[in-house]
Image: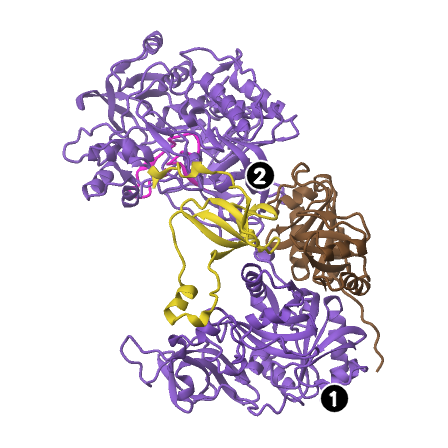
Chain colours: A brown, B yellow, C purple
Amino acid sequence: MTVETPARFSPLSAWQDRLARLPAGVRVRELPFLSQLTLRAEPGGAAAKAVEGCLDVTLPGPSRAEMSGDVKVLWTGPDEWLLVAPDGRREELVPRLRAAVGDGFATVTDVSAQRTTLALSGPLVRAVLAQGCAIDLDRRVTPVGSCLTTLLAQAPITLVVRGEAASSVWLLVRSSFASYVAAWLLDACTEYRGG
Amino acid sequence: MQLIACPWCGKREETEFHYGGQAHVAYPEDPYALDDEQWAQYVFFRDNPRGPFTERWVHAAGCRRWFNALRDTVTHEFLAVHDSRTDQPATASTALASQRRKGQEAGR
Amino acid sequence: MNNPFRVRGHGHVDPDTTLSFTFDGRTYTGHPGDTLASALLANGVHHVADSIKYGRPRGVLAAGAEEPNALVQIEAPFPEPMLTATTVELYEGLVARGLSGQGRLSDRPDPARYDTLHAHCDLLVVGAGPAGLAATLTAARSGARVILVDELPQPGGSLLGSQELLDGAPATTWAGDVIAELGTCADVQVLRRTTAFGHYDDGLVLALEKRTDHLGAAAPAHVSRQRIWRIRARQVVHATGAHERPVAFDDNDRPGIMLAGSARTYLNRFGVLPGRRGVVFTTNDSAYPAALELAEAGVRIAAVVDAREEVPEHWRTACEERGIDLRAGHVVTGTSGTGRVSRAHVAAFAQGRLGDRRGVDCDLLLVSGGWNPAVALFSQARGALRYDAEAGAFVPAQPLDTVRTAGSAGGTFTLSGCLADGADAARRALAAIGGTGRAVSLPATVPLPATVPLSDGAPAQVLWRVPSPRDGQDGTHQFVDLQRDALVSDVLRATGAGLRSVEHVKRYTTIGTAHDQGRTSGVMTSGIVAEALGVDIADLGTTRFRPPVVPVAFAALAGRNRGELFDPVRVTALHPWHVEHGALFENVGQWKRPWYYPGAGETMEEAVLRESRAARTGVALMDGSTLGKIDVQGPDAGVLLDRLYTNVMSTLEVGRIRYGVMCGVDGMVVDDGTVIRVAEQEFLLTTTTGNAAKVLEWMEEWLQTEWPGLRVHLTSVTEHWATIPLVGPRSRDVLALVAPGLDVGNDAFPFMSWRDATVAGVAARVCRISFSGELAYEINVPAWYGIGVWEALLAAGDAFGITPYGTETMHVLRAEKAYPVIGQDTDGTVTPQDLGMSWVVSGKKPDFVGKRSFTRAENRRDDRKRLVGLLPADERVLLPEGAQIIATSGIPEPPVPMLGHVTSSYRSAALGRTFALALVRSGTERIGDTLYVPLDGRTVPVTVTDPVLFDQEGTRRDG
């Protein structure tokens, strides 16, 4: 029996049409199939430095994300980061990082399908998020580059501020919660549909 | 909705945290050197003071880190939070400090 | 004629637009800017409803949220009960009726939207009266982030109800100018129609914004009708004003009896005369402006009755000039009237004695017993109160670090004082957070006698109640709480019964428990109790203020957490397939799991029998993706697992799998699952679906707090994997088809081992484990590929009759093999030994979590409950899970000795009968005995058996 590689489905593949019909002022796009790895290492330690050298990035400090490179680095805990890279990089990155760490103590785990990524943009994003996020997204409090693991409505999320005053954000959502978050976002936008 | 200052993530709403009971209740060095009653003290018995109490909390919806906190069980005020690995104070008290005690005791 | 009681030249309603509304079946008109109460009064309607207990006619006492009487039911556009007519904005098409204390919820779903919004600011100002506006302006000009909330549709607060001048113009002009300036500040938000109803910890204030209520049927459907604001403020200023309180006297509840300040508000805010011929009864100066302004507008003031002997000269003169009969040292002792008040009885009052009574005809009796600062929010914020003997009111004792009051909320009653106090409060608030409040030039006020409420002219007399002239029935017609129909005599009965605390009196009499939270009755009750007991009211205090300050609809509190958003629904990658193929779902925590897949016309029982038959005789598959999965990596991974599992994990070879149980320090089972060794320094363990987060948190607690030196990291990978158990004697055949590169032979791929393989073209991890006793494989692929692999398995298994099955069949299969489900067959009091799983407890390891407790005397008792099987004598009887088990066929007299309970109960295709698992005291020793399960008034005999009821030899797992 011959087998073909089956198609992939992202957690929100069935939501694309609905997400495409949001009111002006807020755009929501799923960035499916990103390579995502959990990195655990003692900050400043040899293993962490090896990872930084390998990826040519500086591991960001608390509540910050380093979004400039090909491999983006999101702080998720005092010795924990989420590495986010384009689709198809996970098979290559895991062994490369593990090799770089060598005998040092740092661990890399493939969690690519654990979460999906939503890119939100537009002047209404902050108001939409304020319906369910208790954190102050004012630009003076939560500037660009902030990375917060928190709750949106009743779902755990990691929020990365990419544009001033949350005019552009990434939401990383656990796959099982993705349709809840999508439904919540659509409902939150009802207010702006203008009759 | 109280704010709790996570040593790593800063002030967050209390729903992001889970409670872990009394802090500094170490696993006994040698459980088998204890008789049943002494062992039961470790397993089942905890302090329940009126006033400052050292507790374990975890920032469950955030950085997943356990930390120790000194909380006043009368006012619920967090007097300090500590990184449990070093047990050094990580931040000072949250707002609404002393005023709470001055609160409306008369109205009780 | 429309609105016979409307006067020209007064009020802020829009006279050019007419709104039509219906009250108690009759149609009336009003204007934009009216409340339902002001529109009714403009039409001469005073009687709103009859009281709840005594059925006495009641009217409108107040003009705002303190109203105790005028409860209405809105019938259209959508039914809503228990609103006060004084806070319902009038709109076209409003249909309402008066309520005797109880309303009716709609039997239709509410079509309106409700939502919640989080907001943050440096300074929150509650109340847009003179103090609140001055505070907001001061902070706004200093560049602070400010939110101003106010319950009214227009700014000004008490200014709307007065004829005050500021800088020589009507004070409301100044209020409008301030709001206009605030509108130009980027960091200032003004929320109208918004009531702060709760002040919570750490500067959190909840406020209810009524966004479209005032639009009636014209409200746009996409805009939320009401919004809960969750405002987190670094500093809060309560400029919440004060509520006027009445004085108790006989028959003080008739329509036409109104608070003096409220009557003034009806004139100045709404242009409405609440009567034609008024009597004013007061204990303080604040009623005089009301009397004079109403007289000016055309109300004949028949008398001003002032309880004080000494009345300030300027008020005497003003009354004289207008020919108003001023009776100092007098009180109103009672009223007459059929329905509405028609006469006030007036008597001299000195040293507690009443003189002769004289009747004064009137259709309006205005009362002022003084003013209570609105301190509910301040008190909720844990602000202390003190009794101010001069004002006869409880006022804030001192500001808090982050909360202060301003204006009359703090006991400052002059307009100039309120303005200065507001600005000062804002400056102090900003200073407390390291800012600087810029000085703001405040508008000039006009000196006395035209003042807001209590003037600083003359002291008020504190008078809670006028003695009843009726001998022997003291206080029987004197109402304290009009909504609860609670009387002075009820308060005296409470103190007579020995109650000393106002909290107890409140509960005994129900005073203060209605929608109005006792705004007009609470302090009066304290005063009457203090007099009755001969104690100082300052020591007695008030009852505790609790949120919400105003009634808030549950719909608003629920917000958008309704319907599909009520609680997050977690789904697996395969969920769309299950939906498409008609699965019925079971809720497991927040997860939706396929329960069973009914065929056409199939009952649940038939479907489950069919699904289990397929798994036992052919091949079946299910979605196991919800199992918790934790990646454990690091040099000390084995050490950690050895400490947390009851058996040894560190000796597991790479490529092999072991079942394990975790216990708490008390020796009770916490969770179970499989552990696979991925690599020398990496394990992957599974947890029960509902325990995934709890187990990870618990493992982290041990690791982070007890053994921080262990070099090991834990990562949840639950949702990274789609997990598909492929079960049944033909599962090997199906796997061979989709994984041609994998040697599926029993020797090459033995039980409790795993292989990385390409399955249906996808890199997969295949585990040979079984939760059914059958030959089975668990196929794990990244979740994106779940549906593709699932469909490939279905296609490959078609020839073998492959059957998808749900959780019900899973339970039947596992229960037949006595595989326990943690949390169903255990309840936190069950050890591995109780489950008959001593084999999973290592005797070699010196210690692990729970081990020491296994040797506690309590855990070694012979009569502990043990897991056993139960076979009902009648093979058709399905025992309910949770059913109790007793020793006798008859039910003895209580207390009935209980031997245990049924934990799992199913109908088995393989056994051709029903069966159950149960925890039974000394269960192992009772195998073969007959016990009884009480059920529907009879007892069902059951035989105790070994828990493993199917394939006890375990021959089926290798196919």
Q: Where is residue C480 in the image (x, y as percent from the top left)?
A: 29, 35
In this rendering, which labeled residue sits more in front, label 2 or label 1? 1
Q: Where is residue C896 in the image (x, y as percent from the top left)?
A: 31, 77
- Counting labels gives 2
Residue for badge 2: C212
- Asked whether residue C804 is in view, the answer is no
Above or below, C611 against C316 in this view is below
Residue for badge 1: C745
Which chain letter matches label 2? C
The disc labelled 1 sits on which kind of residue? Gly
Residue in the foreground of this view, choosing between C746 and C343: C746
Taking the view exactly as shown, the residue that stands out farthest to the left is C472
Q: Where is residue C617 in the image (x, y as percent from the top left)?
A: 65, 89
| Residues shaded magenta | C49-73
Dots 2 and 1 on the same chain? yes
Q: Which of marks 2 and 1 is nearer the N terminus?
A: 2
Quadrant containing the C terminus of chain C in the rendered view: bottom right
Residue in the foreground of this view, choosing between C694 and C287: C694
Asked which secondary structure carries label 1, the reply is: loop
Which chain letter matches label 1? C
